[in-house]
Amino acid sequence: MAKLKYKRVLLKISGEVFGENGKGISLAAYEQMAKQIVKIKKENKIDLAVVVGGGNIFRGRFAEKSGFDMAVAHQMGMISTVINGLALQQCLEKIGEQTRMMTAIRMDAVAEPYLRRKALDHFEKGKIVIFAGGTGNPFFTTDSAAALRACEVGCDLILKATNVDGVYDKDPNKFSGAKLYKKISYREAIEKDLNVMDATAFALCAENKKPIIVFNVKKLNDISKALKGEPFGTLVN
């Protein structure tokens, strides 16, 4: 087996993968994702963290048109990520995987509050750590949460699962001639406004030299290629 380039990895999963057509909740989708996550961890023997989005349930930015207080709307979005995290955790544990879910918003009855030292201890014990609740603050995306946690707990790589094969120069769902980048710098992604991650997430990753691989969630079973440093999706560094 080829030597792994990355040993501690954070997987960022959009909430849309847990719904039907991107919305609502599909128990089968949680179960399928749990099986894939366990396969990745066991086959590659890596430390694995997961950050979940909540867009299948509620997106804070969509409430602005309805006159919602945006701080409240973002809090609702953060709580949505906890629902997804709980469901994913349950499915992981059903198939025998040890996990811990940690939330940026205190919800002691359902999950541990996020503490960096505790998270590191969970990795040492071989557990999959699910980070939910975003950053705990409104106006920050779950991409920012992924970048922040990856920096805090010493991840070597951020894997961002999307519904396309990587980073394109324009939306491939709208433009048939869209060009897929195999590799791109943080600066170029920001300057070209490629919407891979928000600027806050990019700034954290750039400052702390955290590479990002953007790939199609349908190719999750092939993620060992990325972990070995082989071409896979789009590498942002």
Image: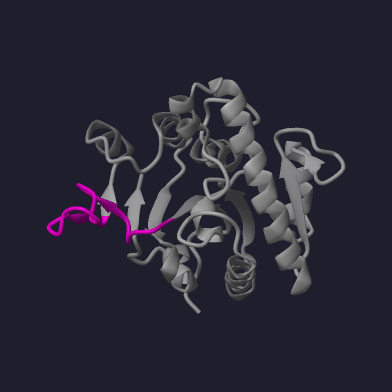
**Does residue 215 appear to the left or right of 154 in the view shown?**
left
**Front residue of 178 and 222:** 178
Percent across and percent down for residue 203 are 42, 30
**Front residue of 4 and 44:** 44
Residue appearing at x 35%, y 47% in the figure: 236
Q: Which residues are magenta?
A: 162-182
Residue 151 in view in this figure: yes
* Quadrant, the C terminus: top left
Residue appearing at x 69%, y 45% in the figure: 82
Q: Which quarter of the figure has residue 25?
A: bottom right
Q: Residue furthest right?
A: 109
Percent across and percent down for residue 223 are 46, 68
Percent across and percent down for residue 35 are 62, 73
Residue appearing at x 39%, y 30% in the figure: 199
How many dots with numbers? 0
**Does residue 43 appear to the left or right of 232 in the view shown?**
right
> Is residue 227 found inside the magenta-colored segment of the image?
no
Percent across and percent down for residue 185 are 29, 41
**Front residue of 157 and 64:** 64
The answer to whether residue 143 is above or below residue 67 is below
**Front residue of 67 and 85:** 67
Dominant secondary structure of the magenta stretch?
Answer: loop
